[in-house]
Structures are given as structure tokens and as C-alpha cells.
Image: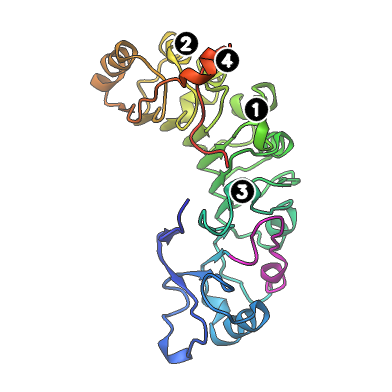
């Protein structure tokens, strides 16, 4: 993983150590990345945070990205951000856990439930979370959230279940890197039932159920899921999709209304890739099947059912 370079349509600006007010950009023109410690400076996080809150016009800030040390291995807190709720009146977007691989493996980025953050910022439109350890989404809903992405090697199934059941009437984009049980994942199709049924998310136009070892099962469920007709794009990328799942998609409900079907990082045969293109590309659907991956012979020799793996784990 790498640090995000743009967020919420804004260029990312890392608040520098020992910054001077005259050197800073307009508060509303950038997404403010906050990261200090051994990777950016030796200034303490308390001093760094105090300078940011004093030197930046917080009422104009639209987007905030929290990196080290707010979200690091086995830790992580957005309490400082929530504490500024009365001043961050224009906040529209938050990215939690923007750490590179050298700072923390994605499976070790410390998280917690997102209830406090969502309650503190009812005007929030975009939320990105990197990590999965102890993550939860214990809220019945959020009226203004338009985009939600969880990047993880394993999202706790309870969190996925809560997201699937939440009332998010403005949500247009949902992207979940479901991950594997070895890293805290293990979501089942049944836990996604309200989402697949199209409940509580009438504005949803992009759905990504990604990075999952049960991609074939997800594809089979989506083949008849009521949510699909309202979508403009669908992603089953980064996972263990095989010809079995692709066959289910082709034999299921029409997908020709989609603008894009993203199946990248897959285990499809060349014949199946051709079938997908032939069926969907003439209708104007962009079919992304880059990243053809071969099964790992080691697992097959060990007697495993298959040698497929997902893109992001540790």
C-alpha cells in the first residue's frame, strides 16, 4: 500500500513539521494529511496536532487524512478529530489509516468502531478506512454519506453485516475489501443479504465486493440480486474469481446496463475471458479482466481444493 495522493477531488498536502503559517495553502484547497513521528519528523504528535489546529482555518477544511501515529499497528484513534467537531464545520471527507507498508501491514492497522465519527460529523460525504483490526460500523445509518471504502486484508464479518444493514440513503459508492479469515475476515453471502436485496441504499450506483476468497459465491448471488439493476458499475476484483463465478454472471440477470464490470486479479480461463468480452463489450460495458493469475501449484500438491489467493492480506 502507498500513501494516497489525492482525496475527495483534492490534492493531498501533508502538514509539515515545524510549518510556518505563510507557507500553508488555503485550508479548503487541499486534503490535509496529518502524519508525524519517525517517518516524517521527530516532533511529538501532541505538538504537531496543536500547531495544525492553531495554524489552519479549521472551519474551511473539507478533507482530513490521518496517518501515523493516529492509525498504526494495534492502535489508532479519531478522538482528536472528533474533539474538533465544533470547529470542523465544513468537513466532508475523512481517510483513516493512510499508512504505507513500511509503517504497518494493512492487517495490523489499529481501528475501532466508526460510530463516534459518523455521529460527530453528520455532514460527512466520503469515508475511507484502511485496515480491519477491531473495525465496526455500529450505526443504523447516516443521511449524507455518499462514498464508503474499506481497504482491508480481512474486515470483521460483524462490521460488514452492519454496513449491509445500515440505512444510507445518499450512498452512491460502496467498496469493501472483504479479505480472508486468516486476517479477521470471513464474511458470508448471507451476511450481505440486505445489501444484495437493495435495501437501505437507493442511490447506490457502484458496488465493489472485492478481495474475497468466496468470489464465486458472491458472483452467483449477484446473478439474481435485486441490487444489480440499479448499479452502473460492479467490481469483483482482487479475489479468487474462477470460471464458475463468471459462468454464473453470464447466465444470470442482464448486465448490459453496466458501464463497467471489473474482474481484475482473477483466475479465469482465456475462453471465459473471451465469452465475457463477446457478451458485454458490444453493449458498451467495459470489462476489466487484466491481472490473470495462475493457481499456486504448491497448494494443489498439498491436496487443497484449489491454489487461488486474494490480492491483499497482510
Task: Assign the magenta stretch its main secondary structure.
Answer: loop
- In the image: residue 61, left or right of residue 283: right
- Structural crowding at the residue carrying mark 4, measured as other residues with C-alpha within 10 Å and reported as few (<14), some (14–19) or many (≥20): few
Q: Nearer the viewer, residue 115 or 204?
A: 115
Mark 3 → mark 2, Cα distance in angstroms: 30 Å
Identify the image quadrant of residue 303: top right
Mark 4 → mark 2, Cα distance in angstroms: 22 Å
Q: Tell me the mark number nearer the camera, choosing from 1 and 4.
A: 4
- Residue in the image at 67% along x and 29% along y: 186
Q: Give the structural element (helix, strand or loop) at label 1.
A: helix
- Structural crowding at the residue carrying mark 3, measured as other residues with C-alpha within 10 Å and reported as few (<14), some (14–19) or many (≥20): many
Rendered image: mark on residue 306:
none
Q: Which residue is mark 4?
A: 302
Residue 8 x, y percent position in the rendering: 45, 58
Q: Are marks 2 and 1 in contact (CB under 8 Å)?
A: no
For marks 3 and 1 on the same chain, the one whose residue lies earlier in the sequence:
3
For marks 1 and 4 on the same chain, the one whose residue lies earlier in the sequence:
1
Q: Give the structural element (helix, strand or loop) at label 3.
A: loop
- Residue in the image at 40% along x and 61% along y: 5
Identify the image quadrant of residue 247: top left
For marks 2 and 1 on the same chain, the one whose residue lies earlier in the sequence:
1
Q: Which residue is mark 3?
A: 131
Q: Nearer the viewer, residue 294 or 222?
A: 294
For marks 4 and 2 on the same chain, the one whose residue lies earlier in the sequence:
2
Mark 3 → mark 1, Cα distance in angstroms: 20 Å
Q: Which residue is mark 2?
A: 244
- Boundaries of the magenta span: 68-85
Q: Which residue is mark 1?
A: 192
Amino acid at each position: 500500500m502507498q500513501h494516497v495522493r489525492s482525496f475527495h477531488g483534492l490534492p493531498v498536502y501533508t502538514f509539515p513539521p515545524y510549518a510556518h503559517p505563510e507557507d500553508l495553502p488555503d485550508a479548503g484547497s487541499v486534503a490535509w494529511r496529518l502524519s508525524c513521528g519517525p517517518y516524517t519528523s521527530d516532533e511529538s504528535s501532541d505538538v504537531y496536532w496543536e500547531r495544525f489546529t492553531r495554524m489552519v482555518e479549521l472551519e474551511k477544511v473539507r478533507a482530513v487524512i490521518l496517518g501515523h501515529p493516529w492509525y498504526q499497528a494495534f492502535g489508532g484513534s479519531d478522538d482528536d478529530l472528533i474533539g474538533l467537531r465544533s470547529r470542523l464545520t465544513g468537513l466532508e471527507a475523512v481517510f483513516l489509516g493512510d499508512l504505507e507498508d513500511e509503517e504497518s501491514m494493512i492487517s495490523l492497522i489499529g481501528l475501532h468502531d466508526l460510530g463516534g465519527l459518523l455521529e460527530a460529523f453528520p455532514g460527512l460525504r466520503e469515508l475511507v478506512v484502511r485496515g480491519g483490526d477491531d473495525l465496526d460500523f455500529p450505526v443504523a445509518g447516516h443521511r449524507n454519506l455518499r462514498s464508503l471504502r474499506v481497504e482491508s486484508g480481512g474486515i470483521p464479518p460483524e462490521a460488514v453485516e452492519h454496513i449491509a444493514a445500515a440505512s444510507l440513503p445518499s450512498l452512491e459508492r460502496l467498496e469493501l475489501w472483504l479479505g480472508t479469515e486468516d486476517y479477521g475476515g470471513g464474511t458470508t453471502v448471507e451476511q450481505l443479504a440486505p445489501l444484495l436485496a437493495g435495501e437501505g441504499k437507493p442511490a447506490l450506483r457502484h458496488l465493489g465486493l472485492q478481495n474475497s476468497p468466496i468470489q464465486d459465491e458472491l458472483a452467483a448471488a449477484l446473478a439474481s440480486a435485486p441490487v444489480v439493476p440499479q448499479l452502473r458499475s460492479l467490481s469483483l476484483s482482487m479475489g479468487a474469481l474462477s470460471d464458475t463465478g463468471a459462468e454464473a454472471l453470464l447466465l444470470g440477470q442482464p448486465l448490459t446496463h453496466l458501464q463497467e464490470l471489473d474482474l481484475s486479479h482473477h483466475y479465469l480461463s482465456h475462453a471465459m475471458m473471451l465469452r465475457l468480452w463477446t457478451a458485454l463489450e458490444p453493449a458498451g460495458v467495459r470489462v476489466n479482466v487484466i491481472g490473470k493469475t495462475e493457481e499456486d501449484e504448491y497448494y494443489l500438491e498439498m491436496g487443497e481444493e484449489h491454489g487461488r489467493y486474494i490480492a491483499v492480506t497482510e
